[in-house]
Image: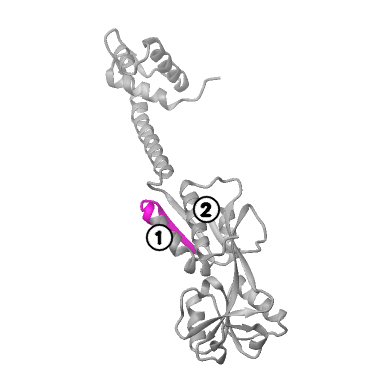
Amino acid sequence: MQAPMELYQLEYFLETARQRNFTRAASRLHLAQAALSEQIRKLEVEFGTPLFHRGRRESTLTAAGETLRVHAEGLLERAEAARRAVQDVAGLRGGRLSVGAIPSVSACLLPGAIAEFRGKHPLVELALFEGTSEAVAQWVESGRVELGIVQLPTAGGRFEEHLLLTESFLALVPSAHPAARQQSISLAKLAREPFVLYKGRARDTALAACRAAGFEPRIACESSELETIRSLVGAGLGIALLPQLATRQGAANCTPLRLRGAPVERQVALLSRTGHPPSPGAAVFTRSVFAQCRAFGGVV
């Protein structure tokens, strides 16, 4: 069985075509003439036709050889381009990294990590996609994004979970609210208040916390936009229960309060696809995310 054609054989073929002489080509390639002739013979066997008109002083291409020359030059150019592209990615001098995250993380934790990554590796294109925890997990599993950041638990799938942080929920109240003068409050004390719910897993956590405190919250509004939640609370529309990350940046006319009693918490994890070693860019970005978590004080 004939071995498949190799790129080095095409390089030998092209050099022979350029030199129009096997002896000169072998010298340029630092090969014995017999070794070069054998590689050309293997190509001719593979294609089933002579590639050179062999003369005593000069060897010229046949019609088949001329056709192969055109394609061989293109193949070697593409192979070299692929080699350079791979080296650029490995050296973080190019390539693309796609990351998915839930909005509270992308807005409050990732900007620092992204700024650090882009400052060190400006030639790597970084794409950020926002979605629910379920959507981000699906993106990781399908390969749409290489890394995803979600609120646990996940439904399970072809991805690995790396715990990033455990954080508490706080009550965000209008600054004009009487409770705003306190540093902390029992969730049960807010049972009569209207609530502004942050959609996604944070909504589920907030509802479960209210029910555990003995009441069903009266919902004034729901939104998937963190800035909208803050604005509505600041306008006095209601109270919001938000993860601590989402309260780090001050919001106009809003005051965050710690919750007394049983802790209301969530766990945030970084997902990567099972069986796929991280790209160089993903490995570096992951370290930046963990560094941001350490600065936040929530790394487990």
Q: Is residue 64 above or below residue 173?
A: above
In the rendered structure, the answer to whether residue 228 lies left or right of residue 197 reads left
Instruction: Report if residue 127 lies within the magenta region.
Output: yes
Q: Position of residue 130 (x, y in %)?
A: 50, 65
Q: Residue at x 62, y 53 (%)?
A: 160
- Residue bearing the label numbered 1: 115
Mark nearer the N terminus (1 vs 2):
1
Occupied quadrant, residue 36: top left
Tell me the amino acid under the disc marked 2.
Glu
Magenta residue span: 119-129
Q: Secondary structure at mark 2?
A: loop
User: Label 2, on which residue?
Assistant: 146
Quarter of the picture containing the N terminus is top right
In the displayed orientation, state which residue is furthest to the top: 56
Residue 185 locus on image (x, y percent): 62, 84
Q: Is residue 8 left or right of residue 300?
A: left
Residue 225 visible, this angle: no
Q: Disc 1 vs disc 2: Cβ atoms closer than 8 Å?
A: no
Compared with 276, 202 (above or below) is below
